[in-house]
Image: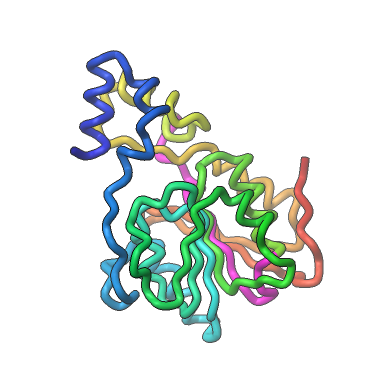
């Protein structure tokens, strides 16, 4: 049974809020196995974009993905060393492809354990879709981004007002009341874009729109200047 059918079933029973809070992770879990190699993976729009960015630089050898869920993007990235971080990855972690590591923990916990010298050429942020968490992931990631690396932030353009609500449960409840059957949740990640413009002169960014998977790509214009979080 797909997640959409489960949500509608909960709505009819009047238990939507309780079921979302208690069962969302199990609803997503399917224990599928990742493709044995990136070449054999079906891929996503995100993985296509990441692979183009990696090949443009010509020397990307390390990749970090925050928020992997089912792993469709992670398995299709053609970078030798890949690290995925998610507290509840929805795939089997047995027999992972060569060069791929999955850390089953929150992004905050992961960055606390990461050595200061760890560097990644490409970082993809697709974790919890809230401004606060994504911005914290961004600042932590920039400390470990190679000076010539790129970072991609997902879900920066919500599809409508309901999908931009920062609380997942409230967003789904509002969509159910409106009769929506194709649930979308982008959260309030979009708030990061004007923050980059106004408070991070050490960064340059470009927001990609038009293919149904809007993302912001950013890089350091001044690799020697530290990115400090804005309160």
- The quarter of the picture where residue 2 lies is top left
Q: Which residue lies furthest to the bottom in this view?
A: 58
- The quarter of the picture where residue 160 lies is top left
What residue is at 58 percent from the left and 51 percent from the top?
Answer: 107
Q: Position of residue 111 (x, y in %)?
A: 65, 56
Q: Which residue lies furthest to the top in this view?
A: 14
Q: Which residue lies furthest to the right in this view?
A: 225
- Quadrant containing the N terminus is top left
Asked if residue 220 can be seen in this view, the reply is yes
Q: In this view, does 52 lie above or below 158?
A: below
What residue is at 64 percent from the left and 47 percent from the top?
Answer: 135
Q: Position of residue 174 (x, y in %)?
A: 38, 22
- Left or right of 74 in this view: 194: right
Q: What stretch of residues is rendered in magenta?
A: 144-161
Q: Which of 82 and 222 is in front in this view?
A: 82
Total numbered badges shown on the rendered structure = 0
Q: Which of 133 and 93 is in front in this view?
A: 93
What residue is at 39 percent from the left and 54 percent from the top?
Answer: 213
- The quarter of the picture where residue 183 lies is top left
Task: Answer whether residue 146 is magenta in the image.
Answer: yes
- Left or right of 133 in this view: 165: left
Q: Nearer the viewer, residue 75 or 52?
A: 75
Asked if residue 126 can be seen in this view, the reply is no
Q: Where is residue 173 in the image (x, y as percent from the top left)?
A: 37, 22
Q: Is residue 27 above or below residue 169?
A: below
């Amino acid at each position: 049974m797909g997640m959409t059918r489960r949500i509608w079933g909960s709505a009819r029973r009047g238990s939507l809020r309780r079921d979302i809070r208690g069962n969302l992770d199990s609803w997503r879990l399917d224990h599928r196995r990742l493709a044995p190699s990136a070449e054999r993976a079906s891929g996503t729009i995100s993985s296509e974009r990441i692979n183009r960015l990696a090949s443009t630089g010509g020397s990307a050898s390390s990749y970090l993905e925050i928020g992997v869920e089912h792993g469709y993007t992670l398995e299709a990235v053609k970078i030798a060393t890949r690290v995925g971080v998610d507290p509840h990855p929805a795939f089997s972690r047995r027999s992972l492809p060569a060069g791929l590591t999955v850390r089953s923990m929150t992004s905050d916990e992961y960055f606390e354990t990461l050595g200061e010298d760890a560097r990644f050429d490409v970082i993809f942020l697709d974790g919890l879709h809230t401004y606060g968490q994504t911005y914290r992931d961004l600042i932590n990631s920039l400390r470990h981004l190679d000076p010539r690396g790129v970072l991609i932030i997902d879900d920066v353009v919500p599809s409508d007002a309901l999908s931009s609500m920062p609380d997942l449960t409230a967003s789904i409840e509002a969509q159910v009341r409106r009769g929506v059957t194709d649930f979308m949740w982008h959260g309030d990640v979009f708030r990061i874009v004007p923050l980059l413009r106004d408070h991070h002169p050490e960064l340059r960014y470009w927001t990609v729109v038009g293919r149904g998977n809007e993302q912001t790509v950013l890089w350091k214009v001044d690799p020697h200047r530290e990115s400090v979080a804005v309160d």
